[in-house]
Each structure stands twice: as C-alpha cells, then as structure tokens.
Amino acid sequence: MNPKLSLAIGIICISFSPILVKLADASPIVCAFYRIFFAWIFLLPYCLYKKNLKMERKNIILALIGGVVFASDIAVWNLSLKLISATVSTLLANLAPVWVGLLSYLLFKKKSGSLFWIGTAIAIAGMVVLVGISNLLHLQFNIGIVLAVAASLLYSIYILITKDILKRISTIPFMFYNMLAACVFLLMLCGIFGNGLLHFNIKTWGCFAVMGIICQLMGWITINYAISHLESTKVALTLLSQTVIAGLLAVLILNESLELKEIIGSVIVLAGIALTFLKPREIKVL
C-alpha cells in the first residue's frame, strides 16, 4: 500500500476513538486498556499461525518499551482531561510534531526542513483557532497542563522509537509485543486507580471491541506501516488531523455542532499539514 494512503486510513481509524470513549460507560483508562486488549487478542491467532514472533532480543525489548510509552501517553492524556478542559488538553497534547522535530535534530542531527517548520506553525495556529483563543487566555497553570504536555512528549518519543525499530522488523510482530506491554501496563494502572474491569452493558462492550479492532488494530497497523516508510516528523504532524476528523465524526454520530471558528481552525490545520507534503524529499533549512 502507498504509505501516504496507509497513513490516511490509519488516522481515520483512530479518529473514532474519542467518539467511542464518549459512548462507552467506563473510565478513560479502562477504555484504553480494552482498546489494546481486544486488538491484541484478535492479533494473537494470526501471529501464532504465521509463527513470526521470533526476533532478536534487542528488537523485542524496544517493542516492549514502545508499548509502555504508548500506554503511558494514553494514560497521562486521559488524566489531564480530568484536570483541565478537553479543548486545552487536546491542543497541548498535539505539540508532538514540535517535539519530534526538536528531538530528531538534538539526538540524530537531522534537520526537518523549512517547509516542515512553516507547516507546523500553521497547523498549531489552526489548533489555537479550533479550540478558541479565549480558552488559552483564561488558562490557569496546574498539574493538568503538565500532564498534557507530558503526553505530547511521550507521543513523540513513541513515534521516534517506532521509526527506529520498524526499519528492521515487520509491523505485525512489533504490534504483538508492543500491545502486550501496553496491556500489562494499563492493567496495572487500572488496579492502582481501582477501576473495575467487569459488569459493563452490551453497548460498552461493543465500544471496547470496535476500539480494539478499528482504532487500535487497523489504525496502528496502517500508521506503523506508514512510519516505517515516511519521515517521522511528517507523520507526527499529519496525526494532528485526527482532531479535525474526530470533530466531523462527532457531528455525524453524536449530533454535535461545529462553530465557525472550529471550521476555520480545521481548514488551517489541514493546510499546514498539506504544506509539508508539497515536495517528496526533505527540504534543507535555508
């Protein structure tokens, strides 16, 4: 599959996640656990049949570490939602492209290119318009802000770890070990926070299953495939469009309405993302 098409499919799949979390009658961390658990359960028979789980110990360890980082990102972001508004938390959590660009330069001396930084600035400006400038002007510093920024940093670290390991191994076995570690970690968090894992209604179990199959399994198999072929900075920036797509899905599924500022902000975000893909090769910093 064309990596750009694969990335687009993956982003559409993961964009259903916040909708399903709203529909599910369960805590955000429990939703995160079952999202990964159901995906892992569905992937297990395929991996056992293909017998493709043998890898070098180094690659297995990196995949497990990536799983813990991914699970931490979900958990930290969900905790921030309890302390600050969802709009501000979403804006701060989507600073991942900036972190990816900075870490790529600091750790690997890789310049992201002038178009990437221009596109990033435009996309972040669009996010500010989308969530509302007034929400930022009345922002009061608290631990929720720290958690949201930490989530964006964890997201960027996951992308960089994934990029490195997927150069050497295929996506499916990586996903197996990655989600196994994420499941164990989130299960521990559920125990720490005292979240019950049973006694949900049929609708909630259905949301868990769809989150696992569509959002996690299909979504991240296609995204990880794209990461292995595209620049990590561009993938991180393109993932910003998840917020835009999720907003459109909320209109269609939850009957929510979009304000003019949200429409304008979404267009600006997409324009910034599109700018980074104008040329197939990385543009050197002028």
Image (cartoon, rainbow, N blue to C red):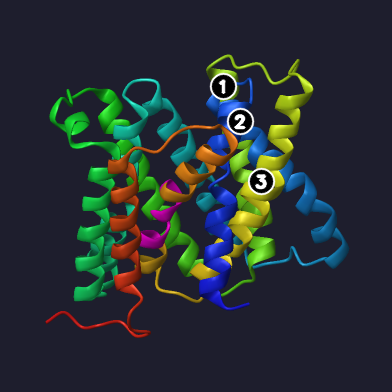
Residue range highlighted in magenta: 236-243
Give the x, y percent position of residue 245. Answer: 48, 50
Query: What is the chief secondary structure element of the magenta stretch?
Result: helix
Vertical arrangement, residue 177 with respect to residue 7, above or below: above
Give the x, y percent position of residue 281. Answer: 34, 85
Can the viewer see residue 167 in this picture?
no
- Indicate yes or no whether the magenta region holds residue 58: no
Residue at the spot of label 1: 27
Report the mark closest to the observer, 3 or 2. 2
* Element on which disc 1 rests: loop
Image quarter in which the C terminus is found: bottom left
Residue shown at 57%/57% (left/top)? 63
Vertical arrangement, residue 182 with respect to residue 143, above or below: below
Do the numbered discs 3 and 1 sit on residues whose CB atoms are within 8 Å? no
Residue at the spot of label 3: 180
Do the numbered discs 1 and 2 sit on residues whose CB atoms are within 8 Å? yes
Give the x, y percent position of residue 217. Answer: 67, 52
Residue shown at 30%/26% (left/top)? 144
Amino acid bearing label 2 = Cys
Please tell me which of labels 3 and 2 falls first in the chain.
Answer: 2
Residue at the spot of label 2: 31
Residue shown at 37%/30% (left/top)? 86
